[in-house]
Image (cartoon, rainbow, N blue to C red):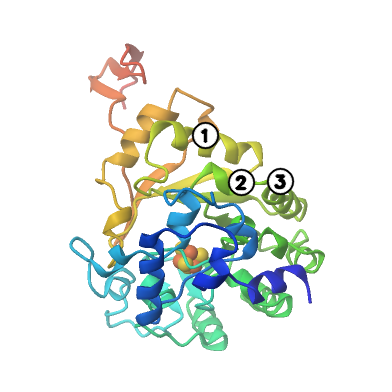
Amino acid sequence: MEEWMMQLETSVNTLEKLKKYIHVSPGEKEGIEEAAKRNVRWGTTPYFVALMDPEDPNCPIRRQVIPSVLENENRYGVENYLEWKENRLTDEDRPECIARQYHDRIAFLVTDVCAMYCRHCFRKELVVIRGLRFRFDIEEGLQWIREHHEIRDVLVTGGDPFVLSDDKIEYLIAKLREIPHVEMIRFGTRTPIVLPQRITPGLKKVLSGNHRVPIWINTQCNHPKEITEQTAKAVYDLLSCGISIGNQAVLLKGINDDIDTFKELHQKLLTIRIRPYYLFYCEPAPGIDHFRTPVEKGAELIRDAIRGHTTGMAQPMYVVATRIGKIMLMPYYSYVEKNDEEYVVRNFKGETTTLPNIPE
Ligand code: SF4
């Protein structure tokens, strides 16, 4: 068995297994027992669990992996969030595996299995709690895409599509590439972070090559502690297949919502060749109030930790993902005033300057 499969087979998803790695706090124990009672999924690979601080219950990795009793509370979240957010209650006839918010691109859900069951997941009703069940019928999804000529960009997601076998991933890519109007394939996968062993020679072979339809990957890394030499190697291996990797961090209270951590995360991503792409506001799925900050927090962090303070490439776009698409919420300090002759603009230090304008 390949190592990545072994990692999934031996997933740390019980109190007894977790105790081999860390000193489980009374609060964590209660959260795990509660999750077991409610039959809620949790856990991740031994590789990722080994990155936990054994003594600190506030360790950013522990908080993302170990269930909390706070998941039972839902003061600010939206019930039936996923159906509402993904416009699944509209009249359009779509297979359950297709989520749509835009005209020319869709999310193609191919599994509800993940290498880690993130406590803050916005798809938790489907992936973690599993009160919501979809049919992951790949053939049905492919046929729908074939019939919809406006779809040029397919995001393959789940769950985590890289938990599928090489053969299944190869089949999916080949079938999507056969569709003349598909121009690009994106994979959303957390495996480079939680299961870097997944980037095997076999998978590299499946992903490699200079094809008409390129592959892009976006991953999710939320804290600098999640980045290791193995992550760096996995990313380099993917790049050597001609695939570039972006990061979609989620803004998480007490995990990455302070200036120093936020800056270090985005700088460290660049050191291993991952390009910060999005910072997502933590979505109002039910039971994750304890991870959510005020909405403006992400823009403040970009203003105070990134823009002007470090390499421009380290700056993600801050977005809120809504049922009408992603909406950018960047800091609004830069523009002061304008007229036909000039713009007055402000930098990160509060200094202003003028820029000659050109009339239409
Ligand atoms: S890997 Fe993605 S889909 Fe899976 S639990 Fe985490 S955020 Fe949700």
Quadrant location of the N terminus in the rendered image: bottom right
Q: Residue at x 18, y 63 (%)?
A: 75
Q: Residues within 10 Å of mark 3 (few under 14, many from 20)?
A: few
Can you say whether 178 is above or below 335 in the image? below
Distance CA(mark 2)–CA(mark 3):
7 Å
Q: Is residue 237 above or below residue 15?
A: above
**64 vs 283, nearest the viewer:** 64
Front in this rendered view, residue 277 or 162: 162
Q: Are marks 2 and 1 in contact (CB under 8 Å)?
A: no
Residue pointed to by mark 1: 264
Query: Quick one: 153 or 87, which is closer to the camera?
Result: 87
Frontmost residue, 44 versus 345 = 44
Q: Looking at the rendering, in which quadrant would you find the C terminus?
A: top left
In terms of secondary structure, where does tag 2 sit? loop
Residue, x 52% and y 38% (percent of image)?
266
Q: Splitting the image into 4 quarters, where does residue 121 fall?
A: bottom left
Residue 139 in view of the camera: yes
**Mark 1–mark 3 distance (CA, rounded to whole Å):** 16 Å
Q: Is residue 210 left or right of residue 342?
A: right
Find the residue positioned furthest to the left.
75
The x and y percentages for residue 149 are: 50, 74
Residue occupied by mark 2? 227
Q: CA distance from mark 2 to mark 1?
A: 11 Å
- First along the sequence among labels 2 and 1: 2
Side of 91 relative to 215 (left or right): left
Going by the numbered disc 1, the residue's amino acid type is Glu
**Judging from the image, what secondary structure is the residue with disc 1 in?**
helix
